[in-house]
Image (tube, helix red, strand yellow):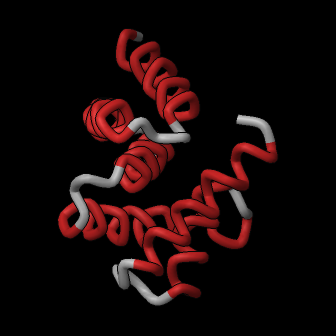
């Protein structure tokens, strides 16, 4: 993803998490921002993962949360769970005609390649 697209994707995650009261807005910013590779959050991947796992429990129809969960799983080299989460994200993105479908498809394709190794 380019910087502009990545920003929109992260902003969408933050907006979703905070709007639906999954977590307070500032916590959502921290949880999602760490997924962008900010060095201040590098060792907090487990923290972000637990927030996103809770998010998909509560809002299982969110392609954005599933896609972000796929990202954090892949950051932990857990490519099988990442692909499962990404497949959910892709299915939902297609159902919802998501504006993020191209980013979700790109991650899904990359994860398929990772799991084939």
User: Quarter of the image holding residue 96?
Assistant: top left
Question: Which residue shows up at 39% across the image and 51% down it?
Answer: 69
14 is higher (above) or lower (below) than 93 = below
Question: Which residue shows up at 73% across the image and 64% down it?
Answer: 39
Residue 31's spot in the image, x, y percent?
A: 52, 71
Foreground of the two, 46 or 95? 95
Q: How many marks?
A: 0
39 is higher (above) or lower (below) than 96 = below
Residue 9's spot in the image, x, y percent?
A: 61, 51
44 is higher (above) or lower (below) than 98 = below
Foreground of the two, 7 or 113? 7
Residue 28's spot in the image, x, y percent?
A: 51, 77
> Can the viewer see residue 78?
no
Question: Which residue shows up at 70% across the image and 47% down it?
Answer: 6
Residue 61's spot in the image, x, y percent?
A: 25, 53
Q: Residue furthest front?
A: 97
> Can the viewer see residue 47?
yes
- Please state, as top left, top right, bottom left or bottom right, where the C terminus lies in the image: top left
User: Quarter of the image holding residue 20?
Assistant: bottom left
Question: Which residue shows up at 37% across the image and 10% down it?
Answer: 116
Q: Is residue 86 left or right of residue 103?
A: left
36 is higher (above) or lower (below) than 54 = above
- Please state, as top left, top right, bottom left or bottom right, where the N terminus lies in the image: top right
């Amino acid at each position: 993803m380019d910087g502009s697209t990545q920003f929109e994707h992260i902003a969408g995650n933050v907006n979703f998490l905070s709007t639906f009261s999954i977590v307070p807005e500032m916590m959502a910013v921290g949880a999602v921002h760490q997924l962008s590779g900010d060095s201040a959050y590098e060792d907090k991947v487990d923290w972000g993962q637990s927030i996103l796992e809770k998010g998909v429990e509560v809002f299982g129809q969110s392609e954005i949360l599933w896609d972000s969960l796929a990202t954090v799983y892949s950051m932990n080299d857990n490519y099988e769970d990442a692909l499962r989460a990404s497949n959910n994200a892709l299915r939902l993105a297609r159902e919802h005609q998501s504006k993020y479908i191209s980013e979700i498809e790109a991650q899904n394709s990359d994860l398929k390649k990772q799991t084939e190794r």
